[in-house]
Amino acid sequence: MSDSAQRYFEQAAERLGLTASEKKLLLTPHREVRVQVSFRMDDGQTATFVGYRIQHDRARGPMKGGLRFHPEVNSQEVLELASLMTWKTAVVDLPYGGAKGGIAVDPKSLSAGELERMTRKFVDEIHDLIGPDSDIPAPDMGTNAQVMSWIQNQYEKYHGFSPGCVTGKPVELHGIEGREEATGRGVAIILGCTLAQLGRKMGGTTVAIQGFGNVGSYAARILHEMGARIVAVSDVAGGITHPQGLDIPGVQAHQSATGKIAGFAGSRAISNAELLALDCDVLIPAALGGVLTQENAGQVRAGIVVEAANGPTNPGADAIFNERKILVVPDILANAGGVTVSYFEWVQNRQHFKWELADVRDKLEKKLSRAFRDVWEISQEKSVSLRAAAYMLGVGRVRQATKLAGLG
Ligand code: GLU
């Protein structure tokens, strides 16, 4: 992802007329932590990995953001992702700042016991820095509800009962209904808002989705239910396409049975590169960052790009999309459904009152539609892209909070 988020911040800062000292204040992370995570492997050997938690900004409230277990995790990437969380929580107007963390490890290379010991060791190292009123982790790539449960349990050994110290927990143990699907559902809601704004219908809209993990598969499922035609999906091993639209529940059943989406009956195999350049209405990158670059942006044939992943478009590709009048719905708006339902979960934990699924979905829809409207209005008023408008909204709100608190 390199320095994409910083470049987008700089562009917004310029449009908002921020001074050099304001820019420095907003860009400098609050705290960066790097820890050794050593634990016993099943074979008796000791394994050592590096863990990070970077707290970017806390002007609007406790810092919030996921934990990523992935071999490519490094301090530069975590800092970028932490800053995205600051702007994202502000765009959706949640009472939070931004943070991110992770461990540079391939979780698939560990047994369940090793994964648990590693997670607990990481919490041992950072438990004093996180908490329901300071910094609240959540799932991201390579982590899930089980990992969040271990985090809660380990945190409570030091601090006592505190279910609000982490979100994305299992529904059976202080989690909230609808959190697992939330990011994918949010992507579908935001695409619905976009199409409605353009006077177009979801029914029959053709969609290609890169990535079939938590976010991509829920987005595919929900868009399919809403009447869109999912013409292609892919995972790390490659993709599948069907011009008439894939039967998404069937693809999911095939994936559960075989562990991959390739070979789904009646589909044609395509590469990830082909998927990005597919002739369709909407392209949804829902996997790693940095997949849309100067090199391939010219080949994209979709008219709308919805960023379900964090940081999928680098600034060179973003400029090409703007020039080609391809409408890009930016990550800090398009994938904000996850952190929004995390917020509902945190509220539920503080009130010890369980929310109904229908309530979660209804409030998610309201929150995201409101954010979409705010961003759209700025983009119209200032004649800027949706990304520029979202950054102006997010950065502007954080600046205002900083000022009101007496800094800057
Ligand atoms: N990891 C998700 C994101 O990037 C969710 C963060 C959260 O729920 O705190 O937005």
Image (cartoon, grey):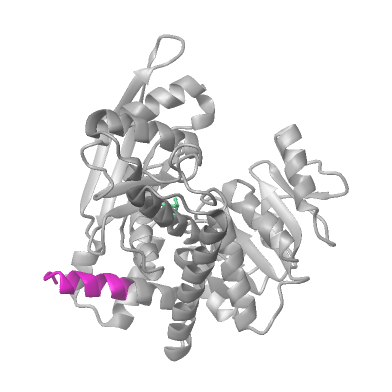
Please indicate, yes or no, whether residue 143 appears anywhere in the rendered image: no
* Foreground pick, 378 / 227: 227
The residue sitting at 44% across, 65% down in the picture is 332
The residue sitting at 49% across, 39% down in the picture is 170
Report the span colored magenta.
395-408
Please indicate, yes or no, whether residue 163 appears anywhere in the rendered image: yes
Q: Residue furthest front?
A: 353
The residue sitting at 36% across, 77% down in the picture is 392
In the rendered image, which quarter contains the N terminus?
bottom left
Which quarter of the picture shows residue 103? Answer: top left
Q: Residue furthest bottom?
A: 381
* Foreground pick, 402 / 328: 402
Task: Label the magenta part by its dominant secondary structure.
Answer: helix
The residue sitting at 54% across, 48% down in the picture is 180
Residue 3 drawn at (x, y percent): 37, 59
In the rendered image, which quarter contains the C terminus?
bottom left
Placement of 33 over or under 278, stated as above or below: above
Placement of 116 over or under 209, stated as above or below: above
Residue 286: say if magenta: no
